[in-house]
Amino acid sequence: MDTLISDQLVSLLEPTAMRVWVEDRYIFLELTDGRVIGFPADRFRILRSASSQQLQEVSLRLNGYALRWESLDEDITVPGVVAGHFQLPLLERDAVRVAA
């Protein structure tokens, strides 16, 4: 199978991110399929205790398949986030914000 075709099939099956940013302790991803999704940093143990400055230091890795916080030594997969695989439950304050 041609590598280009193989890469295109993988990108159709697993979402990847083109851009990542942080606002008010929420991490947002712009996916290659045009969706924008966000999640509270408090859904992950290490991110929950990170400062706002540390959260801002996120970068995309592995061609958009992973998020990396170098100073926290934390990696999170984009497909995992899109599938809703979080380490911690949604806090009540975040549930209210999502519903609004």
Image (tube, rainbow, N blue to C red):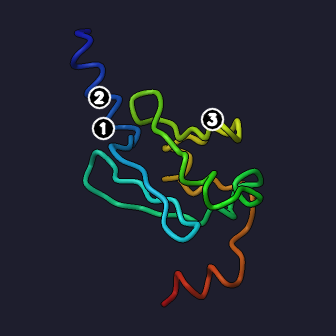
Residue 38 location, x and y as percent? Answer: 47, 63
Look at discs 1 and 3 and give the one toward the viewer. 3
Could you say where residue 6 lies in the image, as x and y percent from the top left?
29, 19
Relative side of 76 to 16, left or right:
right
Above or below 89: residue 84? above
Query: For mark 3, what is the residue?
Result: 70
Q: Amino acid at mark 2?
A: Leu
Tell which of 38 and 69 is nearer to you. Answer: 69
Q: Is residue 59 above or below residue 3?
A: below
Q: Are marks 1 and 2 in contact (CB under 8 Å)?
A: yes
| Image spot of residue 22 (x, y percent) | 49, 60
* Residue type (three-letter) at the residue carrying disc 1: Leu
Q: Image quarter for residue 36?
A: bottom left
Disc 2 marks which residue? 9
**Mark 3 neighbour class, 10 Å CA radius: few under 14, some 14 to 19, many 20 or more:** few
The disc label shown at residue 12, or none = 1
With 36 as the anchor, is 25 left or right in this view? right
Along the line of sight, which residue is nearer the eye, 6 or 99? 99
- Helix, strand or loop at mark 2: helix
Q: CA distance from mark 1 to mark 2?
A: 5 Å
Q: Position of residue 98 (x, y in %)?
A: 52, 81
In the rendered structure, which amino acid carries the disc numbered 3? Glu
- The residue lying at 51 percent from left, 37 percent from top is 66
Q: Residue at x 41, y 36 (%)?
A: 64
Classify mark 1: helix, strand or loop: helix
Residue 89: give its label.
none
Q: Quadrant of the N terminus?
A: top left
